[in-house]
Each structure stands twice: as C-alpha cells, then as structure tokens.
Image (cartoon, rainbow, N blue to C red):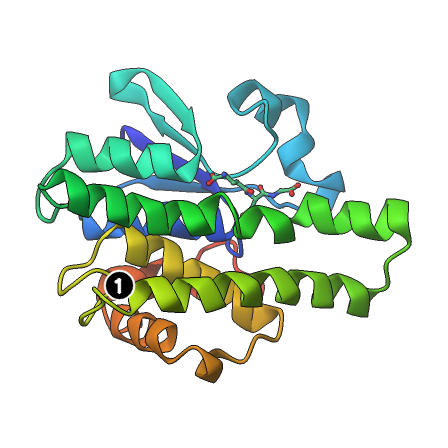
Amino acid sequence: MSLKLYGYWRSSASYRVRIALNLKALDYSYEGVHLVDNGGEQTSAEYIQLNPSMLVPTFVDADADITLSQSLAIIEYLDEKYPQPCELLPKHAQDRARIRSIAQDIACDTQPLANLRVLNQLRNDFSASDLQVKNWAKYWIEKSFVALSKKLETRTGKFAYGYQVTLADICIVPQVYNAIRFGVNLSEYPIIEKVYQNCSAIDAFEKAAPENQPDAQV
Ligand SMILES: N[C@@H](CCC(=O)N[C@@H](CS)C(=O)NCC(=O)O)C(=O)O
C-alpha cells in the first residue's frame, strides 16, 4: 500500500485527513503516534525525521516519493491527485476561496490555540490549573464559533457550503469534536450543529471519528 498516515486518534488535524481519505475511498495504512505516552512520540528522533515540526499528521505517498505535513496541504494534494469520486473544492475561484477561508479560520486561527503543546506551556510556564487550561481552550473555540456561525449564515445548505461536502466540513467536524471535549455548548451554535450532524451521518466521517481508530483509548 502506497499511502500511509501517521496520526493520533484524538488529533483534529489527523481527523481531517482521515475524513478526506475516506471520502476519496482511498486505502491507506495508519500508524498511531501517541502524543502523550513515551514523552510524546511526536518528539522522538525517528518521528522528527519524518516531520521536524513534531506534529501530527504526517502523510506519505511512497509511490510519488512525497512526505507531507499540514493537513490542509495533504487534503488539497489528495483532492488534486484523486478528483474522483468527489471533489472537496468546487470549480469556481470564488467558491474555492470562500471554502478555504472557512477552513483556515479553523486550521490557522482556532485549533492551534488549543493545541496540546500550547496547553502544556500554559500549565508549565504559567502555572495554569486544569480548569484554567480548559477555559482557555473553550474561550478561543467559542470566539471562533461566534464568527463562524455568522460566516455560515449566507451559504450553508445541508453542509457548510451548499449541498456538497467540502474542505470546510472536513475542518468543522473535527473542530466540533474538540469543542465538545472542552465543554462548549454546541446548541448555542445551531448552524454549526446542523452541519456537524449532517456530516456525522456520512460513512466517511463516521469511519474517521476518533473512537473508531485503531489507536483509540476510549
Ligand atoms: N497546522 C497543522 C496542525 C497540526 C497539529 O497541531 N497537530 C496536533 C494534533 S491536532 C499535534 O500534533 N500536537 C502535538 C503537540 O502539541 O505536541 C495541521 O493542520 O496539520
């Protein structure tokens, strides 16, 4: 098998790539990188060879001789290389740009603020308690969801952007998973909740869910 994903069951960035791989109906092998055990396997010398950023996911397409980090780059690579059975970005430039904008709201401006190493730094260098750390993550996700709800108002159909699953949905669903973990009340964001529920009913999303991964600890 040529495609391999290094990920962690609860990592939302890995979850994004798993959804895309499933939507593309691609076969891939999966290797769990435990972000906590063994001092954080993402910091091992072996893993740093693959991904010097010490983050998951890392994606390898051995046949194409490419090793990639960054979930959005990986997903766009898959979308360009495997346009069938569904395209994750539509044809028109303005639609693509709007969808990328939503994806980046999450991947660039929301998820990084509640990343494990950021939360650990709050604990270690600023003596934040577990409750303060949780509230920090919740605060930034809620701020993001208020803005996202507004942005979704005009073009959301069954999914985030109309009636086809796109890169925007692939980013929203894992972010909602994180939001629930940090105690965000999803019912305060009905548009996001609707998108989450509609996507969750699709096999590709269900199969990619954290609890359904081989390295899940539930
Ligand atoms: N922008 C990156 C983010 C990757 C990322 O933040 N991964 C997290 C898990 S979701 C991670 O590996 N964290 C490990 C750590 O914080 O030490 C992407 O989209 O792939």
Q: Is residue 14 visible?
A: no
Q: Residue furthest top?
A: 65
Q: Which type of secondary structure does the marked residue at label 1 adopt? A: loop
Looking at the image, residue 208 lies above or below residue 150: above
Quarter where residue 171 is shown: bottom left
On screen, residue 111 versus residue 94, left or right, reads right
Q: Residue at x 40, y 39 (%)?
A: 71
Q: Quadrant of ligand 1?
A: top right
Relative depth, front residue between 161 and 183:
161
Does any portion of residue 185 appear in the rendered image?
yes
In the drawing, does residue 133 fall left or right of residue 148? right
Based on the displayed image, in which of its 4 quarters is residue 179 positioned?
Answer: bottom right
Q: Is residue 4 left or right of residue 26?
A: right
Identify which residue is drawn at 39% across, 69% down: 149
Q: Residue 106: image x %, image y %?
A: 45, 52
Placement of 111 over or under 56, stated as above or below = below
Q: Position of residue 57 (x, y in %)?
A: 47, 38
Q: How many marks?
A: 1
